Image (cartoon, helix red, strand yellow):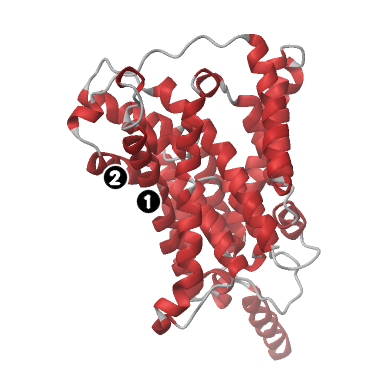
Amino acid sequence: MGEFINFLSNNLADFWTYTGFANATTGHLIMILVGLFFIYLAVAKEFEPMLLIPIGFGILIGNIPFNTEAGLQVGIYEEGSVLNILYQGVTSGWYPPLIFLGIGAMTDFSALISNPKLLLIGAAAQFGIFGAYMIALGLGDWFPFLGTSFTPAEAGAIGIIGGADGPTAIFLSSKLAPHLMGAIAVSAYSYMALVPVIQPPIMRLLTTKKERLMRMPAPRKVSHTEKVIFPIVGLLLTCFLVPSGLPLLGMLFFGNLLKESGVTRRLAETARGPLIDTITILLGITVGASTQASEFLTVDSILIFALGALSFIIATASGVLFVKIFNLILPKHKRINPLIGNAGVSAVPDSARISQIVGLEYDPTNYLLMHAMGPNVAGVIGSAVAAGILLGFLM
């Protein structure tokens, strides 16, 4: 009987070493709370639920404690595990182009085609990317007490957060700074979800009441021929200029051609429906799971979140201020409402909706959504071009 009790107690002791209770750390508990917070934002506040629920649940999955010495092959960083295999779509950078294919198949570039000067707003908002890049690069020299600094490649990967484009951030960080990808991806998607919180105060601060009430002429009707030509010309112009952006830009314009051609409806529906939904689930879960406490809770991660917020604020302010300056040289009847300047970041269509919501607060009959979609889709192109530029001179 005594031997049986000893045998049972030894087995129970061994079993205990495999449980999450025995391997839990404070870091695991903190990250689990972060994951629950993401899910709360998605369910209670409806902030980007399609992104935050997969990422939030992925954070829970990635921070279930286990005995790393047991060789269980369940963790995302353990070679051969299921999660590790799924994560290769992130580390190898092939999830983001597929996401861009779906985005292209969902996007209507009519607002941009009808008013091409709105492209400049999308370009101006990318200053947030390069501004954050320069700040991240000089961080170690300016604040030596932090005890950390970023290489040019790491700074470039961090700066792309300002584009408010999660797939682009993942694609670039997978090439330039794979070890920072978890923090960069979660930061990018967090600020995308917080667009309704971050952007309106900046827009109100930088505009006058008179500017907010400004009306813009209705966009002209765009022909089917123009819609078909646009993705072809867009691909050739952008990729001849920045060939390193080809994986993202090529798939974006290809998806748009599937949509606008009118003869590949099934392919377009697949790209913007089942395909993008499947990839979004896999990307969200694996990005969330990559935030294991041991890899994620570092000083660098905190700095990346701070720099990401700064990058996003700079991008929003740059778009609004550019419109105000641009209006100085435009004829009065062609001036642009500065409230659509925030839409230059590529959080489609949330930032365009914010332009509409803030505009309606001051004039319930002034509809800015169609105008804001111009710089918004230009921001998608701009962030991909910016990523290509950074990739080209930092690789």
Residue 373 image position (x, y, % from top left): 47, 26
Q: Which of 67 and 38 is in front in this view?
A: 38
Q: In which quarter of the image is residue 242?
A: top right
Classify 257 as above or below 83: above
Counting residues from the start of the chain, the first of labels 1 and 2 encountered is 2
* In the image: residue 364, left or right of residue 2: left
Q: What element carries label 1?
A: helix
Instruction: Give amino acid for label 1.
Output: Ile
User: At 67% from the left edge and 38% from the top edge, which residue is drawn?
Assistant: 238
Quarter in which the C terminus is drawn: bottom right
Residue bearing the label numbered 2 = 202
Q: Which of 60 and 222 is in front in this view?
A: 222
Classify 120 as above or below 14: above
Residue bearing the label numbered 1 = 313
One can see residue 26 in this view: no
User: At 73% from the left edge and 43% from the top edge, which residue is drawn?
Assistant: 246
Classify 140 as above or below 368: below
Q: Do the residues labelled 1 and 2 touch (CB within 8 Å)?
A: yes
Classify 49 as above or below 8: above
Query: Between marks 1 and 2, how big is the CA–CA gap?
Result: 8 Å
